[in-house]
């Protein structure tokens, strides 16, 4: 039985990846941070728990990581843990860098010392591209990285230190560069789930207004379930390498909002207002990923369209808001 170790196991991607790996017959281990409300910590992991083992741990606690990896001896390590909210990275820039940048170094060191034969996956992000777009309107593996947020800058460090450790210490360490990916399990302060939840609350008479920030940025939104399949493929490629994971389609926040409200028979213009607290000091205006390398290497194709993704999220909130 193969063993996987996942940081960020209680997050959206960690929970889908755990389900996927358990389905493939893996024994799955992961860490969660200590929290004063433990009931909330593992709510995304409320599925079949056999072969799922969750420990307390933190990416900023290097010795704890090493102790766990020594004990578990995983075959595969997925570093999905992060301070993952871009706007909030402006509120807590040092914490973001400690977790997303030095945290990667901590777990790489633990991996190198405890189980260097394992394979290592780093959750890198399209936010690393920042303001760079190739002349054809896409971002791909070769696009220059000019990040525009503390979050993006911290992720560039993680991406580079993975390269460095791969080359210097001959480790099987890879980067998946994932564009935005969503699902009903997405935190409700990310824009898709915020819009869907808010629109359903309005539809059900529980709220009258939805406050958003910038509606004119564009994102390439896929489904987390499709993207965790890609993580497993990327990690298990015969040669450690980096791959972009994206749908290749882009929509503005305004188009996405219009789609959701229209599906519910509402006109978003009557309910959505701008609140400057949701604006970012520097915005990333446009993302559209070219995942040709991933598709041609693994025959990966996303199963969800943008519409199917949003419809699943709408259905979830319609069923769960009374
Ligand atoms: N969160 C949020 N809340 N975003 C808003 C809002 C709002 O009220 N109003 C407009 N937006 C805009 C943001 O300014 C941004 O342009 C866009 O919606 C998407 O915001 P998020 O959903 O917060 O995602 P993100 O693109 O900043 O970051 C996500 O994707 C990255 C991959 O590119 C996160 O999942 C990152 O962790 C991930 O790396």
Image (tube, rainbow, N blue to C red):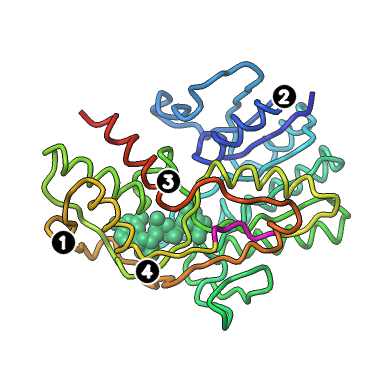
- Residue under circle 4? 217
Q: Is mark 4 within 8 Å of ligand 1?
A: yes
Q: Is residue 284 left or right of residue 247?
A: left
**CA–CA distance between discs 1 and 4?**
17 Å
Q: Residues within 10 Å of mark 1 (few under 14, many from 20)?
A: few
Closer-to-camera residue (264/145): 264
Residues shaded magenta: 243-247
Sequence-wise, which precedes: disc 3 or disc 4? Answer: 4
Q: Is residue 96 visible?
A: no
**CA–CA distance between discs 4 and 2?**
41 Å
> How far across and how far down the image is residue 20, in percent?
62, 32
The structure residue drawn at horizontal position 70% and vertical position 45%, both measured from the top left corner, is 107
> How far across and how far down the image is residue 105, in percent?
69, 53
> How far across and how far down the image is residue 113, in percent?
83, 42
Q: Is mark 1 within 8 Å of ligand 1?
A: no
Sequence-wise, which precedes: disc 1 or disc 4? Answer: 4
- Residue under circle 2? 25
Q: Which mark is residue 269?
A: 1
Q: Is mark 3 within 8 Å of ligand 1?
A: no
Main secondary structure of the magenta stretch: strand
Q: Is residue 291 left or right of residue 44?
A: right
Whether 118 is among the magenta residues is no
**CA–CA distance between discs 1 and 3?**
23 Å
- Residue under circle 3? 308
Sequence-wise, which precedes: disc 1 or disc 3? Answer: 1
**CA–CA distance between discs 1 and 2?**
48 Å
Whether residue 148 is situated above or below residue 23 in the rendered picture? below
Sequence-wise, which precedes: disc 4 or disc 2? Answer: 2
Sequence-wise, which precedes: disc 2 or disc 3? Answer: 2
């Amino acid at each position: 039985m193969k063993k996987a170790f996942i940081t960020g196991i209680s997050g959206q991607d960690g929970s889908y990846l755990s389900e996927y790996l358990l389905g493939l017959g893996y024994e799955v281990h992961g860490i969660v941070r200590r929290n004063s409300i433990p009931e909330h910590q593992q709510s995304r992991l409320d599925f079949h728990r056999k072969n799922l083992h969750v420990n307390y741990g933190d990416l900023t606690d290097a010795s704890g990581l090493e102790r766990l990896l020594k004990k578990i001896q995983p075959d595969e390590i997925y570093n999905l843990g992060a301070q993952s909210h871009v706007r909030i990275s402006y509120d807590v820039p040092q914490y973001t860098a400690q977790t997303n940048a030095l945290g990667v170094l901590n777990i790489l060191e633990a991996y190198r010392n405890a189980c260097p034969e394992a394979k290592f996956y780093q959750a890198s992000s399209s936010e690393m591209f920042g303001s760079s777009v190739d002349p054809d309107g896409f971002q791909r593996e070769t696009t220059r990285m000019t990040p525009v947020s503390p979050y993006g800058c911290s992720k560039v460090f993680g991406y580079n230190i993975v390269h460095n450790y791969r080359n210097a210490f001959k480790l099987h360490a890879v980067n998946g560069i994932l564009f935005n990916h969503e699902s009903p399990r997405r935190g409700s302060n990310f824009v898709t789930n915020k819009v869907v939840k808010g629109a359903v609350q309005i539809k059900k008479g529980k709220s009258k207004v939805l406050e958003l920030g910038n509606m004119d940025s564009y994102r390439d939104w896929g489904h987390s379930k499709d993207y965790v399949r890609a993580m497993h493929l990327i990690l298990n490629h015969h040669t450690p390498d980096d791959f972009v994971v994206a749908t290749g389609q882009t929509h503005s926040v305004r188009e996405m909002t219009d789609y959701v409200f229209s599906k519910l028979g509402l006109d978003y213009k009557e309910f959505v207002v701008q609140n400057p607290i949701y604006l970012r000091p520097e915005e990333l205006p446009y993302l559209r990923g070219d995942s040709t390398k991933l598709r041609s290497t693994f025959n990966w194709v996303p199963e969800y369209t943008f519409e199917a993704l949003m419809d699943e999220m709408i259905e979830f909130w319609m069923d769960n808001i009374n």
